[in-house]
Amino acid sequence: MKTPNFVSMLSGVALATTGMFSGLCLPSSAAQLWNWSSNLGSGTFTTDDGPSPYTITGITGTINIGPGHTITSLFPPGFLGSDNLLYTSSPQLSGGGVAFDTTGPIFRMYWGAFPYFTDYNLSLEERDWYRMSNFSASIQTPSTTPEPSSFLSFIALGGLIFGGAVRRARK
């Protein structure tokens, strides 16, 4: 039986290690996460990578009007006149704002002449307008810890490469 070639094993380990570290260190081009809050609610926006204005592609959170309502979905730009744009400087929301659904009414959060949350489940005559103050949105600090699944995938890949090198050396 032939002993494993040291050079083959070493190259397999080097390749696996290089792949693991380069995969863990590459910057992600993932979406941006923002924390938002106001006197009427708080939550998280998901946006594209920018630059400003960022396009809001997702929303989570709660609206603290009446009994409180959980945000369930974001409506696309154009729904109720929304544009889903977020700016880095004040005012961070445009006059078009963001329209979203909740476990209660449909709301639109926007910054026009006055910042408001608007309840769109009612007729125009009955519609409630809630004055919004202290609105702010800030980008979440990215985590520097690699996801466990990514790390384990690279370890498994290294094991496969190393095992293949050992098998080839034995032939």
Image (tube, helix red, strand yellow):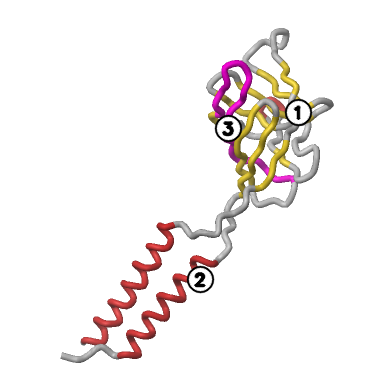
Residue sitting at x 58%, y 28%: 62
Residue that sits furthest to the left in the current view: 1
Mark closer to the observer (3, 2)? 3
Which numbered dot is residue 123?
none
Looking at the figure, which quarter contains the N terminus?
A: bottom left
Where is residue 53 shown, x and y percent of the image? 74, 45
Q: Which residues are magenta?
A: 53-71
Residue 61: which disc? 3
Give the structural element (helix, strand or loop) at label 3. strand
Residue 56 % position (x, y): 65, 40
Circle 2 or circle 1, nearest the eye: 1
What amino acid is found at the position of numbered circle 3 in the picture? Gly
Say whether disc 2 or disc 1 marks the residue closer to the N-terminus. 2
Mark drawn on residue 22? 2
**At 70% from the left edge and 27% from the top edge, which residue is drawn?**
39
Do labels 2 and 1 touch, CB within 8 Å?
no
Please, is residue 5 above or below residue 152 in the view?
A: below
- Label 3, residues with CA under 10 Å away: few <14, some 14-19, many ≥20: some
**Is disc 2 surrounded by few (<14), some (14 to 19) or many (20+) residues within 10 Å?**
few
Residue 18 position, x and y percent, is 46, 76
- Residue 46, given in percent of the width and then of the height, sits at 60, 43
